[in-house]
Image (tube, rainbow, N blue to C red):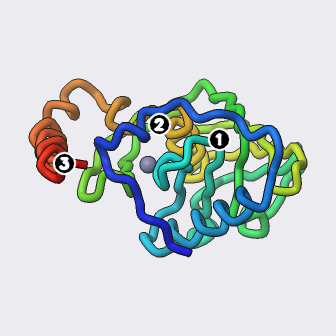
Amino acid sequence: MVRKVVLYPMPVLRVKCRPITEVTDKHRTLAADMLETMREHHGVGLAAPQVAVEEQITVIDVSHNPQCVSFFKYNGQDADMVQHMPIVCLNPRIELGKDKVTDEEGCLSMPDLRGQVRRSATVKVTFQNLEGETVTIESDGLLARAFQHEIDHLNGILFIDRLSAAAKIGLKRKLQRLMQEWAEDGR
Ligand SMILES: [Zn+2]
């Protein structure tokens, strides 16, 4: 089922999500719904707060572009990235590589907003899957960026928080408009 995507500045986007201690049918349904919602909106990732759930779960799928990573390791072994998509990621822990790269990002919770965000070029992410197994993925490119963006969501952090001061000023008017619309909606 496609769920409603929460839009900025709804407060749930600023919540620090709680870890999932036991995977239940509720989480399996949530993951399926999140994947459906992400695809409906042509996104490459979606985090639970974006569907108003305050738990540490995110989904990612970058298989539309097999060239978007230059390497992919699954539990320490070189693997075919496309074979391991989509990713349903519970309770992630992320290790950031030292090299940084700047690229454009957007967010389904902030339609029409884009910005250049500096992030680590490589990541190592350890998480639980829906089967309760612990998995480690190492990669770069769009997948590394998606992991960082989505895991930020689980900590109440949005990509606009990571823009340069100059870029923030550029987006100020748009952000104020979103605040205004939200206030007027009376939600
Ligand atoms: Zn986002």
- Residue 186: numbered disc: 3
x, y percent for residue 16: 54, 30
Q: Which mark is residue 56?
A: 1
Q: Secondary structure at mark 3?
A: loop
Q: Are marks 3 and 1 in contact (CB under 8 Å)?
A: no
Look at label 2 and name its amino acid. Val
Q: Say what secondary structure mark 1 lies in.
A: loop
Q: Residue at x 30, y 51 (%)?
A: 110
Residues tagged 2 and 3 counted as in contact (Cβ below 8 A): no
Where, by quadrant of the figure, is residue 125 drawn?
Answer: top right
Q: Of marks 2 and 3, which one's residue comes earlier in the chain?
A: 2
Distance from Cα at disc 2 to Cα at disc 1: 26 Å
Left or right, 95 with reference to 44: right
Task: Report crowding for label 2: few under 14, some 14 to 19, many 20 or more residues within 10 A (C-alpha).
Answer: few
Toward the viewer: 83 or 9?
A: 9
- For mark 2, what is the residue? 101
Pair 3/1: label in front: 3
Instruction: Indicate which disc, 3 or 1, sits on the residue closer to the N terminus.
Output: 1
| Residue nearest the viewer, comparing 87 with 36 | 36
Which of 175/171 is in front?
175
